[in-house]
Image (tube, rainbow, N blue to C red):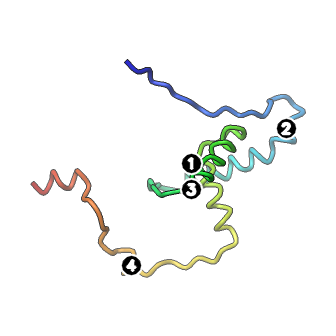
Amino acid sequence: MAKNKNFTFESLVPTNKSSETVSTGTSQQNAMIAAMQESGPSTKVTFDCPNELVEQMKDYGYWEGMSQKDIIIEALGVFFEDKKIRERPEKVKMRKKVGRKPKALKAFMN
């Protein structure tokens, strides 16, 4: 029987008083990530990514105590910070989704 292993990232920054000035940047990043995550409902996203970038992300996350999700959310937040973004037209937003129907709809239709 396989054991269920839960791995969590722990902060590598020491918690003594001398590190408070060092950890202010990290605490600001964590606050920004938390604010983005609490802003409303979220969507799961899947995409292909080059292996080199995935390895860099895993290495960075290990040493900084961040999950891959946190790294991607922070990176997207920084990327869109100075961009002017226009909304898509309603016609495009309401377009029928392509792909498999969710299981709940399949059961309902039968």
Amino acid at dot 2: Glu
Residue contact between numbered discs 1 and 3, judged by CB atoms under 8 Å: no
Nearer-N-terminus badge (2/1): 2
Residue labelled with disc 4: 92
* Residue 74 x/y as whole percent: 65, 55
Estimate the spatial distance between the alpha carbons at disc 4 and disc 3, rounded to whole Å: 29 Å
Sequence-first disc among 2 and 4: 2
Question: Which badge, 4 or 1, comes first in the chain's sequence?
Answer: 1
Is 9 on the left or on the right of 27, as rendered?
left
Q: Which mark is residue 20?
A: 2
Q: Which class describes the residues within 10 Å of circle 2: few (<14), some (14-19), or many (20+)? A: few
Looking at numbered disc 3 in the image, what kind of residue is underneath it? Pro
Number of the label disc, if any, that sits on residue 69: 1
Q: Earlier in the sequence, mark 1 or mark 3?
A: 3
Residue, far top: 1
Circle 2 or circle 4, nearest the eye: 4
- Amino acid type assigned to the residue bearing label 4 in the image: Val
Closer to the camera in the image, 63 or 35: 63
Kindly identify which numbered label has been placed on residue 50: 3
4 vs 3, front mark: 3
Residue at mark 4 to residue at mark 1: CA–CA distance = 28 Å
Relative to the observer, which residue lies in front, 34 or 10?
Answer: 10
Q: Residue at x 74, y 49 (%)?
A: 28
Helix, strand or loop under label 2: loop
Task: In the displayed orientation, state which residue is furthest to the left.
Answer: 110
